[in-house]
Image (tube, helix red, strand yellow):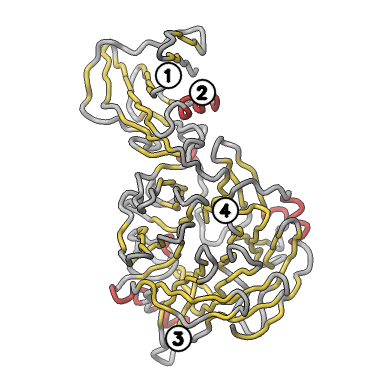
């Protein structure tokens, strides 16, 4: 049972949320440590519109009391699970905008009370985008029978399905879905891929839904990893031949790597595919546009075949020697011409590998994932986030956001003040979304886990979050409508040469 007391300073009024009164103990022993809570929300910076930051006190006791204090009032909750209703949480956060919530936890064993060292949540007026979308995937390397792309309202706990492959699969013909993305955070301009049965790229552009086959005789695959141009009707893709290698002794269970990869540009208006980068000695991947659309950033690894065995086997055998660096190409939107590639960050010269370049909406900072080798860092425990200042060229690790385990896929919010990252820091097996505030100088704050109504939700959830992407609103096209279009014959794109 949740029990609240709210004291309004200056009015001396007590509003009882239930008939019972919760009193903070007056006599207690001070514990010289902050409390252990799950999720760890101690001393985090949060947006003013985030869902209730519910948590569980990780301490065995007979009784628990938690008090929240802001410049606007005091709220007291009883119980080991500290959970707020939406209205109360809104009142708390609104009274602490650009200020702080001070939180005190008291526990009783027998007749003795203890108070842990208080901690704080800082509330920023910079709001976070209203929705986050992600794919939920089982912890397996071959199971795809039930994949869903979901969207979550970040201001409350509403979650809904954008698309489920169960709508297009059967026992004989299964479908894998992946790589959802949006043009400039717009939920009405979305694309994702279906593979195997009913395969193709589904693109929704302001209600015009098309299924496209991006594979041509002149490209090594269909489009794989997408990047919408921020304003024009173009999507850049990498085209990839990808495989998996499994370890028998390494804790990093699987290595996902490309054997070939190039870059292409898809013109939605004219249904045409152009080659952007195609070099047999270069493996280009993970394109991303600058906010002004004048540059296409990507990562690339140089590898020349060395002996008479197959290239695939040779790359698998030498997987720890594959090092990616960051590059960019200029883009002329009038002629669709790309300039020569320019080095942005030479990770390979440091014996490192950089991937997933993502640029802040103001164009000042580029955040990427860096590890020892490879391009798919999702299973690499050494993978961390780094920030490149595009004005000074300085590079720094985002220590406040990183952990001892994997940090991989990451996205900026539309206002550039928040970032989400997929992290395995909880248990090393399941990815969870973590958010962090980034100030105007590029300094991050401590990351916090996606809030849930039940604080232990993620402990009981046996799926990983994949590709967390911010959206300015909700995808309103129904999953059934998308499935109907996915079952249609794909329109074949026309290859139109090199740009």
| Residue at the disc numbered 1 | 75
Q: Residues within 10 Å of mark 1 (few under 14, many from 20)?
A: many
Asked whether residue 253 is in view, the answer is: no
Callout 2 secondary element = helix
Report which quarter residue 354 is drawn in. bottom left
Estimate the x, y position of residue 297 in percent, counting from the top left.
47, 70
Q: Which mark's residue is nearer the viewer, 1 or 3?
A: 1
55 shown above or below 225: above
221 shown above or below 461: below
User: Residue 139 shows which numbered tag?
Assistant: none
Is mark 4 in CB contact (under 8 Å) with mark 2?
no
Mark 1 or mark 4: name the one nearer the start of the chain: 1
Residue shown at 62% from the left, 52% from the top: 148
Q: Quadrant of the C terminus?
A: bottom right
Question: Residues under labels 3 and 4: Cα distance?
Answer: 32 Å
Estimate the x, y position of residue 14 in percent, counting from the top left.
45, 9
Q: Nearer the viewer, residue 465 or 439?
A: 439
User: Residue 281 shows which numbered tag?
Assistant: 3
Question: Residues under labels 2 and 3: Cα distance?
Answer: 59 Å
Q: Residues within 10 Å of mark 3 (few under 14, many from 20)?
A: some
Mark 1 or mark 3: name the one nearer the start of the chain: 1
Is mark 1 in CB contact (under 8 Å) with mark 2?
yes
């Amino acid at each position: 049972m949740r029990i609240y007391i709210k004291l309004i300073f200056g009015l001396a009024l007590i509003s009882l949320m239930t008939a019972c009164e919760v009193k903070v103990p007056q006599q207690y022993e001070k514990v010289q440590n902050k409390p252990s809570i799950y999720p760890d929300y101690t001393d985090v910076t949060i947006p003013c519109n985030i869902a209730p930051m519910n948590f569980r006190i990780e301490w065995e006791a007979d009784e628990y009391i938690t008090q929240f204090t802001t410049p606007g009032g005091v709220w007291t909750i009883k119980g080991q699970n500290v959970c707020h209703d939406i209205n109360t949480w809104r009142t708390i956060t609104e009274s602490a905008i650009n200020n702080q919530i001070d939180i005190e936890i008291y526990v009783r064993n027998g007749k003795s009370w203890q108070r842990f060292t208080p901690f704080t949540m800082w509330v920023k007026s910079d709001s976070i985008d209203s929705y986050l979308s992600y794919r939920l995937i089982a912890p397996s390397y071959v199971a795809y029978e039930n994949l869903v792309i979901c969207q979550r309202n970040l201001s409350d706990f509403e979650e809904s399905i954008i698309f489920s492959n169960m709508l297009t699969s059967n026992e004989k013909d299964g479908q894998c879905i992946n790589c959802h993305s949006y043009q400039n955070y717009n939920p009405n301009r979305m694309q994702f891929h279906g593979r195997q049965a009913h395969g193709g790229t589904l693109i929704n552009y302001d209600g015009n839904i098309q299924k496209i086959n991006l594979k041509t005789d002149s490209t090594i695959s269909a489009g794989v990893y997408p990047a919408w141009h921020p304003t024009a009707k173009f999507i850049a893709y990498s085209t990839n031949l990808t495989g998996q290698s499994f370890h028998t002794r390494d804790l990093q269970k699987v290595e996902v790597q490309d054997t070939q990869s190039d870059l292409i540009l898809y013109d939605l208006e004219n249904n045409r595919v152009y080659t952007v980068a195609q070099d047999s000695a270069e493996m280009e991947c993970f394109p991303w546009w600058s906010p002004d659309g004048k540059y296409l950033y990507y990562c690339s690894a140089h590898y020349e075949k060395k002996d008479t065995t197959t290239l695939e086997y040779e790359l698998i055998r030498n997987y720890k020697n594959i090092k990616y660096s960051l590059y960019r190409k200029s883009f002329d939107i009038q002629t669709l011409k790309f300039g020569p590639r320019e080095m942005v960050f030479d990770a390979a010269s440091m014996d490192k590998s950089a991937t997933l370049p993502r640029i802040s909406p103001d164009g000042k900072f580029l955040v990427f994932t860096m590890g020892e080798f490879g391009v798919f860092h999702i299973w690499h425990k050494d993978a961390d986030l780094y920030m490149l200042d595009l004005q000074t060229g300085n590079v720094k690790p985002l220590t406040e956001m990183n952990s001892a385990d994997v940090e991989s896929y990451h996205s900026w919010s539309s206002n550039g003040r928040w970032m989400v990252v997929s992290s395995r820091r909880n248990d090393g097996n399941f990815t969870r979304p973590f958010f962090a505030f980034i100030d105007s100088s590029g300094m991050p704050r401590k990351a916090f886990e996606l809030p849930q109504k039940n604080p232990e939700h993620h402990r009981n959830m046996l799926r990983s979050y994949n590709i967390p992407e911010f959206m300015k609103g909700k995808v309103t096209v129904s999953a059934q409508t998308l499935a109907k279009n996915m079952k249609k014959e794909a329109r074949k794109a026309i290859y139109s040469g090199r740009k």
